[in-house]
Amino acid sequence: MADKNYKLNTKLIHAGVHPDPTTGAIMTPIYQTSTYVQAGPGDHKGYEYARTQNPTRTVLQDALAAIENGKYGLCFGSGMAATDAVVKLLAPGDEVIVSNDLYGGTYRLMTKIFAQYGIKFHFIGMHDAHNIVRHINNRTTMVWVETPTNPLLNVIDIAACADICKKHKLTLVVDNTFASPYLQNPLDLGADIVLHSATKYLGGHSDVVHGALVMNDAGLEERLRFIQNSCGAVPGPHDCWLVLRGIKTLHVRMQRHCENGEAVAHYLRSNPKVGKVLWVGFEDHPNHDIAKKQMRGFGGMISFTLKGDNIDDALAVLKKTKLFALAESLGGVESLIGHPATMTHGSIPREQRIANGLGDSLIRLSVGIEDVEDLIDDLKQAIG
Ligand SMILES: *Cc1c(COP(=O)(O)O)cnc(C)c1O
């Protein structure tokens, strides 16, 4: 893209994309190839083998970098593959400080896979970012933050984390999956690496599993690109194309996710059978002032409990919704409903789960972009 100063909505559509040089096709072709013909040994057009480079992936990587206000993008076969690549920057003996209300798959990768390679992870509350300082020692090399978190929608102050990391020379990684680049740009707030499960809002249509990293530092990019190629968890060109197609409408989808999320959150608060409603946009939501500072909107992720916090009441609601589909995942155009205590967070012991604020009746909604009146009617008939 000629002009780096375009605004976000323009970048979502045009960044990285050029008309196909052979046909003029406006949409990037799916380069479904494993290798590239060379004129002579080493005489090629920058593409040698498709694990290392693929033109469809290149366009997507450039687009992702542009929309996160970063210099470099790298794509992976899933959000977890991207996470895996970042943790592989570390060496045995290194220590990482991680926000404790974390995507379950990330927790599993750290504790079940990388802990056995001698990397130590400290899971701590970061509601007050300064908690980080107390856990830093001379082996600490990285801080890992997810904000807003899943499913409690805790908000962590990225700029405050970045200040601490700069002072102690630590790499700050922010999983920006929940906010998407439309609502939040962690690199602008001082993060070193932004991570996405593009399976969620970036892809947006529940039809692809994909992951991405964006960064500004050339040295970090070189190391992560080396890991991407060496470990080989790369996405196929068709999956890259689906994400590229998805991000062209990220802004219009996110706008509607935010509007619908706000309406559903307020409806839930008005229902006497509902206990707590967690939505980042409420003025009394913990760290709402930080969300207002670092996010451009509050999104369509909502969690709520039922009065009495009874697990059976929650399961009855899950059975009754017709539009809200019972499923894992989030961020697609269709509305989803889930029960963390028995689904995504079932492996956490009950005592610990409840101590963390994740009650038996907690229900998580990924509010889609259907007509919001229909969504509210569906919840009304399900909750009563
Ligand atoms: C889904 C998710 C991931 C993992 O991504 P996959 O594409 O499922 O591998 C990581 N972080 C967050 C916050 C997620 O929601």
Image (cartoon, helix red, strand yellow):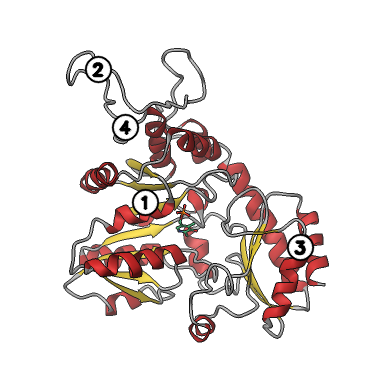
**Relative to the observer, which residue lies in front, 48 or 19?**
48
Residue holding disc 1 = 82
Q: Is residue 209 left or right of residue 121?
A: right
Q: Is residue 129 left or right of residue 218?
A: right
- Residue plotted at (32% across, 65% down): 113
Report the amino acid beneath label 1.
Ala
Disc number for residue 321: 3
Measure the C-alpha gap from mark 2 to mark 3: 57 Å
- Which quadrant is the N terminus positioned in? top left
As drawn, the label of residue 38 is 2
**Quadrant where the image shows the C terminus:** bottom right
In the rendered image, is residue 194 in sight? no
Q: Residues within 10 Å of mark 2 (few under 14, many from 20)?
A: few
Callouts 2 and 4 close, C-beta under 8 Å: no
Residue at 29 percent across and 59 percent down: it is: 87
Q: Are marks 2 and 3 in contact (CB under 8 Å)?
A: no
Identify whether 344 is placed above or below 76.
Answer: below
Q: Is mark 1 within 8 Å of ligand 1?
A: yes
Which of the two discs, 2 and 4, sits closer to the camera?
2
Residue under numbered circle 4: 53
Image-based side of 7 in relation to 374, left or right: left
Considering only order in the chain, which callout, 1 or 4, is on the residue closer to the N terminus?
Answer: 4
Looking at the image, residue 359 sits to the left or right of residue 91; the answer is right
Q: Earlier in the sequence, mark 3 or mark 1?
A: 1
